[in-house]
Image (cartoon, rainbow, N blue to C red):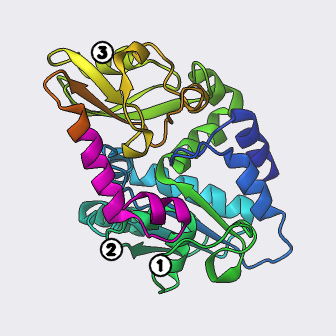
Amino acid sequence: AKASLDELEASGLQGRGGAGFPAAFKWRAVRGQAVTERYVVCNADEGEPGTFKDRELLLRRPHLVLEGLAIAAEVVGAVEVILYVRGEFEDCRRALESAIAVAGERLGVPFRIALGHGAYICGEETALLEALEGRRGMPRLKPPYPTEVGFRGKPTLMNNVETLACVPGIASRGGQWFRDLGRTEPGTKLYCVSGHVQRPGVYELPLGVCLDEVVEAAGGYLGTPRAFSPGGASSGFLPMDYRRHPLDFGALAKVGSMLGSAGVVVLDDTVDLAEAAWVQAVFFEDESCGQCAPCRIGCR
């Protein structure tokens, strides 16, 4: 288990759910807790507009995700693994159930699936935990963080589907192998491409490629590109001046945007950008939990 943790640290794997937080830090934090009743939770509540990578992983590579979860459970000493799956993902649930049945006792600890009910806020880790415990999905105050006080008040490791799918490769081929796959930051990334491109879909590319490279993989632009959203609705829109800017966690943060879940949406010059911004604002007004001041005051 310690060797796996060392390789995870060497890999530089950052959380693929949106925050880009170092995965090894979370794993070490849970493993180091005095409380022995610990949990691993897979965040499969993919709700960010323009993002559809986790759904594809669960459908097409469920065993990869389960293997990542089994390794995580072994490393942190978990007593149970819970997959919190978006309620609309019926096909994903079936794929996971059949993969769990095939894996059987080799998973090491009990695995169970919990279905969400389509609330965007439940993708936030502490709101997800509240929902798992049968309460309204409202975020908790942090600290304490879930690594200390999580599911049922016990230390809990929560990772995104894509983060967990990276783990088996790191365990079998080593951290340096994974690190070398990236360009500006470690590893490959699943980029979701939609909007005005020839072939919308999910493309695995080195972390840090630019928009032109992502769209080239998707068959090229449709029409004359005008703006793009690099990481789902939360990242806003960037002008095409940034088409060669690295799509990674650090570089996008420096220009006031974010990689987030890498939901890349390309808009051509037929789109009214004011309307596009308005549509996003309406989404956040509808989905905000209204709990903290910026949303409560700013999303009127």
Are the residues at dot 2 and dot 1 in contact (C-beta closer than 8 Å)? yes
Where in the figure is residue 198, as x and y percent of width and height? Answer: 17, 22
SS class of the residue under badge 1?
helix
Q: Mark 3 is on which residue type?
A: Glu
Q: Position of residue 139 (x, y in %)?
A: 55, 71
The residue beneath circle 2 is 117
| Picture coordinates of residue 245, whole percent (x, y) | 48, 17
- Check disc 3 and report its element: helix, strand or loop: helix
Give the magenta range: 276-300
- Residue 161 vertical position relative to residue 273 in the rendered view, above or below: below
**Dominant SS in magenta:** helix
Question: Which residue is rendered at x = 63% and y = 56% of the image?
Answer: 71
Considering only vertical position in the picture, is 36 above or below 21? below
**Residue 216 - label:** 3
Q: Which label is found at residue 165?
A: none
Q: Give me the C-alpha separation between circle 1 and circle 3.
A: 40 Å
Q: Is residue 13 above or below residue 89?
A: above
SS category of the residue bearing label 2: loop
The answer to whether 45 appears left or right of 56 in the picture is: right
> What residue is shown at x 72% (from left), y 65% (from top)?
147
Which residue occupies 62% across, 40% down? 14
Which amino acid, by three-letter code, is at mark 2? Answer: His
Q: Which of the 4 image quadrants contains residue 73?
A: bottom right
Q: Which residue is mark 1?
A: 131
Mark 1 belongs to which amino acid? Ala
* Mark 2 vs mark 1, CA separation in Å: 9 Å
Q: Locate the N terminus by quadrant.
A: bottom right
